Image: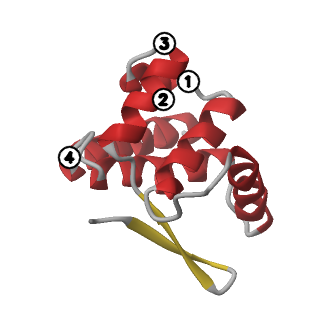
Amino acid sequence: MKYYEIELNGRTVKFRLTSGDCMTIEKTSGKAITDFVGDLSMSSIITLLRYMVRSSQHDFSQEDASKLYDELVDEGYTLEKIISEIIMEALAVSGFMSKKDLDKIRDVKEEIKEKATK
């Protein structure tokens, strides 16, 4: 199974959203995964982190995901960076978007950022 992996405090954290976990998120939230991913609330971000790590650590809980989020922040990640560098990458590895689509999103984001600074 492919994962998006990061090194964090001396350990490797693996992220991937399986189809089964995707269906669980959709069932409990009442939203399609594409709509759920668009929800930038903290509970949605934590839920995505939980289910993305569960594919490699089956007992990974919501509390574990909250601690992971805080650990990422302590290591310099921002909410934007967690979304763009972890969640979006994991969605691409999981087949929910292509790497090309992810690159397009990043290009548009950079264009907007450049325009805002001019």
Q: CA distance from mark 4 to mark 3?
A: 25 Å
Residue located beneath label 2 in the image: 25
Residue located beneath label 1 in the image: 39
- Name the image quarter holding the N terminus: bottom left
Which of the two discs, 3 and 1, labels the residue nearer the N terminus?
A: 3
Q: CA distance from mark 1 to mark 4?
A: 20 Å
Q: Is residue 66 above or below residue 3?
A: above
| Residue drawn at (60%, 38%) of the image | 47
Residue located beneath label 4 in the image: 98
Q: Which mark is residue 30?
A: 3
- The front one of 21 and 101 is 21
Which of the two discs, 4 and 3, labels the residue nearer the N terminus?
A: 3
Q: Quadrant of residue 44?
A: top right
Whole-percent x and y of residue 90?
39, 53
Q: Are marks 1 and 4 in contact (CB under 8 Å)?
A: no
Indicate the amino acid at tag 1. Answer: Asp
| Residue drawn at (41%, 47%) of the image | 88
- The front one of 71 and 114 is 71
Indicate the amino acid at tag 3. Answer: Gly
